Amino acid sequence: MDTEPPTERPADADLDAVADIDWCYEAVQGVSRTFAITIDVLEEPMASYICVGYLLCRVADTVEDAGHIPPDEQAHLLRLYDEALDPDEETTIDEFRDAVDPWLPGESDDLSADDLDEADWDAEDWEVVAESPKVVATFASLGDDAQSAIYPPVSELVGGMAEFVDRYADDGGLRIRTIDELEEYCWYAAGTVGELITNLLAQDVDDRRAEILRANARGFALLLQLVNVAKDVSDDFREENNVYLPASWLREHGVSPSGVTEPENEPEVAGVIHRVTRHARGYMDDAQRYLEALPESRGNTLEAWAIPYLLAVGTSRELLERPEDVVREGGVKVSRSEVMGLVQLFKSDSVDRENIGEIRSQLEDEPFSPS
């Protein structure tokens, strides 16, 4: 789906900021299909807030996933980036950009497709890192309320990623030990993004509704991130040398973390993927309560968050039915027709809070088909 910038902008946006927001919309389309769909169905100003907030997180995520950067340098870059975002620090985003420059694909100012392909690096992710000064400048244009809602969770995400890099510096990559540690990591990687979203949404609701949002935001984020962990086992190991499946669960099945992609371990790893997926499904009720409480104001829409939720439900269904495909074929996902069917369902205005649960129940058992 192409993500088109909404035609209306925040009232205080100047022309330079508008141009940078347009670039940010194009960048999100390249780095995340799910967030591209989400932002496409938001309106202003929420669309810009979520778009820029997500890209701030993506810079850190790309550095944290970079297997070619030594762990000590990764942690240094992440902390430098956090300082550059902190309004109370003197560090500038240009200092971070200069520090990360030697680690960008190709020549320092050359992000050519050939260089990126040779290195097996994601061109769009690294372009966002290269353009981090533009992302931060756009963030600074959003206004004080948005910045105060976005910065604290972004800072927590960046600090948490640096902590995990330090924790596993001697292992060459992350090796999550237990389900509790996995949830800790998922909080930094996704729960903080959920907190960012909730900070923005809770500004427009009464205290009781804000309490419901905050009580269920963690569950919403963990559902989405745990499903990602389960479906991306092969890519995470081969591309980043990270193993997020809990080592304690793998060892119960007689597999070491370094063996998660070995064909002979397919049945055992599939069993752990199945178990993580079942664990993820335990958060579906929390996520649904979150959706039922979220406001539709300042450009926020139900479909922006219901679609990722329902796609996670559908992906969990596929994982439970064929977890071995994660090892055998590199992953599982719902079909493009199912994705587009859900998008079109929301565009038809036939979905509201009351029937999200009905759609969820259908998706838990079978692919989506309009009735």
Image (spheres, helix red, strand yellow):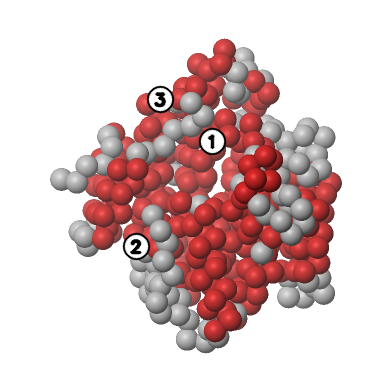
Q: Quadrant of the N terminus?
A: bottom left
Residue at figure coordinates x 44%, y 33% from the top left:
332
- In the image, is residue 59 above or below residue 20? above
Secondary structure state at the residue bearing disc 1: loop
Q: Position of residue 40 (x, y in %)?
A: 40, 63
Side of 288 where 145 appears, left or right: right
Q: Nearer the viewer, residue 190 or 218?
A: 190
Identified by mark 2, the residue type is Leu
According to the image, label 3 marks what residue? 322
Count residues near mark 1 (Cα–Cα under 10 Å), then give few for <14, some for 14-19, many for 20+: many
Question: In the image as oriented, which residue stretches furthest toward the left?
Answer: 371
Q: Position of residue 307 (x, y in %)?
A: 36, 53
Residue at figure coordinates x 32%, y 37% from the top left:
364
Secondary structure state at the residue bearing disc 3: loop
Residues marked 2 and 3 touching at CB (< 8 Å) = no
- In the image, is residue 152 above or below residue 267? below
Question: In the image as oriented, which residue stretches furthest toward the top?
Answer: 264
Secondary structure state at the residue bearing disc 2: helix
According to the image, label 2 marks what residue? 302
Q: Nearer the viewer, residue 292 or 92?
A: 92
Res 232 label: 1
Side of 365 where 209 appears, left or right: right
